[in-house]
Every structure is written in structure tokens, then in C-alpha cells.
Amino acid sequence: MTKKIGDKKVAPVKAGDVKSTEAADQVTGSGEVGAVGAVKGTGGVGSASAASGSTSKRRATTVMSFAEREQLFQMVTEEATKMFAGTQMSDEKQKLVAEAVKMAIDSGLLDETKTPGKKSE
């Protein structure tokens, strides 16, 4: 059987029952501090290197042809039509959303190195 804290009454401790410490009882001995060695210098932190096969610029994994791009945009239009079916959104707003998605996709397909007026790094 496990005893609980409340099962046993503990008598309160009175201030006169506690002995204060005035000094250490006994010192066992003293000695010299050992020699401290010189602090070793540290080198600078090296730069992080890229993992093998990776580059710092994001590139497309495959090249998309114009026909594939048009097929993707047709899919966006079809999905927008399905998504907004049964909603109160007007046809004009539905087209606006679909065009915004197409613009976002198009901007992701652009090659940054060939953007007019922008210097490649």
C-alpha cells in the first residue's frame, strides 16, 4: 500500500529547534593552484559550401513547350470553372481570378537571365 502525504501528520518545526552554522567544522587542507595552460587561438569559420550538384539560382527542371503551356492554361480555366460553379461570384470575377493564376504561372516560367533591362548575376 502506498502512503499518501496526507496520511501522516508532521509536527511543525520551531525556530529554537534549528541550529545555525557559525563556522566550518574542519578544513582538510590547502594547496597550490596548478598551472594554467595558455589559451589556444581559434581559426575563422569557413564559408558554407553548396551541396554537390546544386546551384545558387533556381532553374526549371524541364523546359515547357508552347503547346504544353497552352494546355496548362486550359486546365487552369477548366479548374476555375469547376471551382466557382455554384458560387455567387460573377463571370467577370471568375475570369479575373483565372487570369491572375495564369499570370503567376507565366511569371514563374520566365527565365530571369533573359529578362530585358535586368543584368544577370
Image: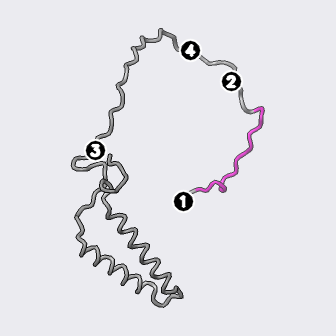
Say which amino acid is labelled 3. Ala
Question: Is 101 placed left or right of 67 in the picture?
Answer: right
Where is residue 113 drawn, in percent x and y? 30, 53
Question: Going 25% across and 50% down the picture, which residue do you hit?
Answer: 54
Quadrant in the picture for the N terminus: bottom right
Image quadrant in which you'd find residue 72 = bottom left
Q: Position of residue 35 (x, y in %)?
A: 42, 11
At label 2, counting other C-alpha atoms closer than 10 Å, the crowd grade (few under 14, some 14-19, many 20 or more) is few
Residue named by callout 4: 27
Side (left or right) of 29 relative to 109: right
**In the image, what residue occupies the spot 32% across and 48% down?**
120
Mark 3–mark 1 distance (CA, rounded to whole Å): 63 Å
Mark 1 nearby-residue class (10 Å; few <14, some 14–19, many ≥20): few
Cα distance between the residues tagged 4 and 2? 15 Å
Q: Which residue is mark 3?
A: 50
Rendered image: mark on residue 21: 2
Secondary structure of the residue carrying numbered label 3: loop
Q: Which residues are magenta?
A: 3-16
Residue 40's place in the image compared with 69, above or below, is above
Left or right: 15 with respect to 117? Answer: right
Q: Mark 1 falls on what kind of element? A: loop
Q: Are marks 3 and 1 in contact (CB under 8 Å)?
A: no
Residue at the spot of label 1: 1
